[in-house]
C-alpha cells in the first residue's frame, strides 16, 4: 500500500514507522528540525514494544512531490486540521482514503469539507507517544490500539484492507459499524485526563487517587457524556464508570499529549479537547461548569503560547 503520513509526530511517526517495517511504501510529511533530522539519520523509535530505526526514510515538506497515494493518515494536532486538509489535496485521487487518527470529535467533518466526505474514514487511536527530539519518537504505552469504520456504518472493503495493514504492522486494530459512538467514548476519556492532567501537571498516577482531583475527573467525564447524549450519540450506560476504570488501569507515568504541550509552553489542543465541550453544551442547553473552569484556567497560557508562535 502506498501511504502518506500527514504529521510525523508521536502518533504519525510511530504508526508510520510500523507500516514501513511491515513493508509498505510510506512517505512522511513533516517540517523544520524534525524533517531535517529524519533526512539526516532516519526516524528513530524508542518503544515499550521494541526500538527500531527507519533509515533511509522518505520524508518531505511538499506533498506535491509525493503525488497521489492509496491512504493518507492524518495525524496533525487538531488546530492544524484545515491546513493539513489543504496540504493533502495533491495526495488525493478518486480512490484515495483519508483516515484521521487525531484527537477530538470533529476531524472527519473538517477534513471532509475540504477533501470530500467520500474519501474520509473515521478513526480513533489509543496511544501515548511523543517526539522526544528531532527525528526521535518515544512511545510509552503498552496500548497502541486503533478502531476505524465508515462514517455511514458500513464495514467496507477499504476499511478491511486498511485494518489488515495496520494489524499486520503490530497495532491492535478493530473495525466498527458505529464509529461516532467510538469517537465520543474515547473523547470522554481523553478530554478528562487531558483537562485534569493539564491542570495538575502531574503524571496520572499522582492525581487519580486524590479525592478532590478524582471528583473533577469524574465531573468532566460526565459533562462530555451529557453533551454526547444531547447530540444524539448513543453511549453505553456506564461509559463514565468504564472511563474511570480505564484511567485507573493505565500506567501511572502516562501523560496525554495535550498535557505535554501545556507543560512545555507550546500551543495545545485546548480548543478541540476542552473548549468544544462548553461550546456544544451552550448550544444544546447542557451545563458544563468543570469544562468551563478547566478552559478558563488554561486559556491564558494557551494565548501566551499562540503569541510566542506568531512572533
Image (cartoon, rainbow, N blue to C red):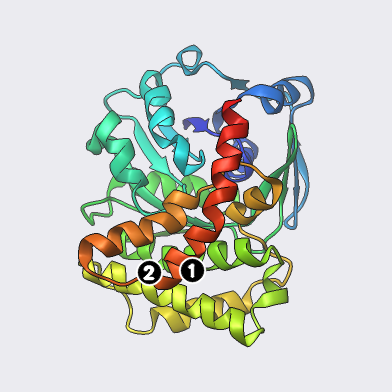
Drawn side of residue 125 relative to residue 158, left or right: right
Height in image: 242 above or below 92?
Answer: below
Q: Position of residue 72 (x, y in %)?
A: 43, 33
Drawn side of residue 6 relative to residue 123, left or right: right
**Residue for badge 2:** 224
Q: Is residue 124 visible?
A: no
Q: Nearer the viewer, residue 238 or 166?
A: 238
Quadrant of residue 94 within the rendered picture: top left
Q: Position of residue 262 (x, y in %)?
A: 63, 51
Q: Specify the farthest residue to the bottom.
A: 211
Secondary structure at numbered mark 1? helix
Q: Position of residue 257 (x, y in %)?
A: 61, 52
Q: Nearer the viewer, residue 295 or 5?
A: 295
Drawn side of residue 284 relative to residue 223, left or right: left
Residue found 46% across the figure and 55% down from its top? 273
Q: Earlier in the sequence, mark 2 or mark 1?
A: 1
Q: Nearest to the eye among marks 2 and 1: give it.
A: 2
Quadrant of residue 230 within the rendered picture: bottom left
Secondary structure at numbered mark 2? helix
**Residue for badge 1:** 189
Quadrant of residue 236 within the rendered picture: bottom left
Residue found 52% across the figure and 16% down from its top? 62
Height in image: 112 above or below 279?
Answer: above
Q: Is residue 48 visible?
A: yes
Q: Nearer the viewer, residue 45 or 86?
A: 86
Residue found 50% across the figure and 40% down from its top? 75
Q: Nearer the viewer, residue 253 or 125?
A: 253
Q: Quadrant of the C terminus?
A: top right
Q: Position of residue 274 (x, y in %)?
A: 45, 58
Amino acid at each position: 500500500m502506498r501511504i502518506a503520513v500527514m504529521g510525523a509526530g508521536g502518533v504519525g511517526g510511530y504508526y508510520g514507522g510500523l507500516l514501513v517495517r511491515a513493508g509498505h511504501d510510506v512517505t512522511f510529511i513533516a517540517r523544520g528540525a524534525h524533517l531535517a533530522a529524519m533526512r539526516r539519520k532516519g526516524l528513530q523509535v524508542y518503544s515499550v514494544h521494541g526500538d527500531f530505526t527507519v533509515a533511509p526514510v522518505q520524508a518531505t515538506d511538499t506533498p506535491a512531490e509525493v503525488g497521489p497515494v492509496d491512504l493518507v493518515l492524518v495525524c496533525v494536532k487538531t488546530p492544524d486540521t484545515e491546513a493539513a486538509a489543504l496540504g493533502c489535496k495533491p495526495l488525493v485521487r478518486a480512490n484515495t482514503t483519508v483516515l484521521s487518527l487525531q484527537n477530538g470529535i470533529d476531524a472527519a467533518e473538517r477534513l471532509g469539507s475540504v477533501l470530500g466526505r467520500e474519501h474520509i474514514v473515521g478513526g480513533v487511536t489509543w496511544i501515548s507517544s511523543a517526539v522526544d527530539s528531532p527525528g526521535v519518537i518515544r512511545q510509552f504505552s503498552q496500548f497502541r490500539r486503533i478502531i476505524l469504520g465508515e462514517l455511514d456504518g458500513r464495514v467496507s472493503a477499504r476499511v478491511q484492507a486498511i485494518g489488515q495493514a495496520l494489524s499486520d504492522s503490530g497495532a491492535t486494530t478493530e473495525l466498527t459499524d458505529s464509529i461516532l459512538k467510538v469517537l465520543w467514548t474515547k473523547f470522554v476519556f481523553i478530554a478528562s485526563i487531558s483537562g485534569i492532567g493539564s491542570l495538575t501537571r502531574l503524571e496520572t498516577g499522582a492525581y487519580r487517587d486524590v479525592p478532590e482531583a478524582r471528583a473533577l475527573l469524574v465531573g468532566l467525564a460526565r459533562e462530555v457524556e451529557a453533551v454526547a447524549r444531547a447530540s444524539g450519540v448513543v453511549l453505553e450506560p456506564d461509559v463514565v464508570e468504564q472511563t474511570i476504570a480505564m484511567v485507573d488501569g493505565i500506567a501511572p507515568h502516562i501523560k496525554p499529549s495535550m498535557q505535554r504541550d501545556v507543560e512545555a509552553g507550546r500551543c495545545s489542543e485546548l480548543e478541540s479537547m476542552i473548549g468544544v465541550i462548553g461550546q456544544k453544551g451552550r448550544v444544546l442547553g447542557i451545563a458544563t461548569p468543570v469544562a468551563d473552569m478547566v478552559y478558563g484556567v488554561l486559556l491564558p497560557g494557551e494565548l501566551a503560547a499562540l503569541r510566542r508562535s506568531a512572533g
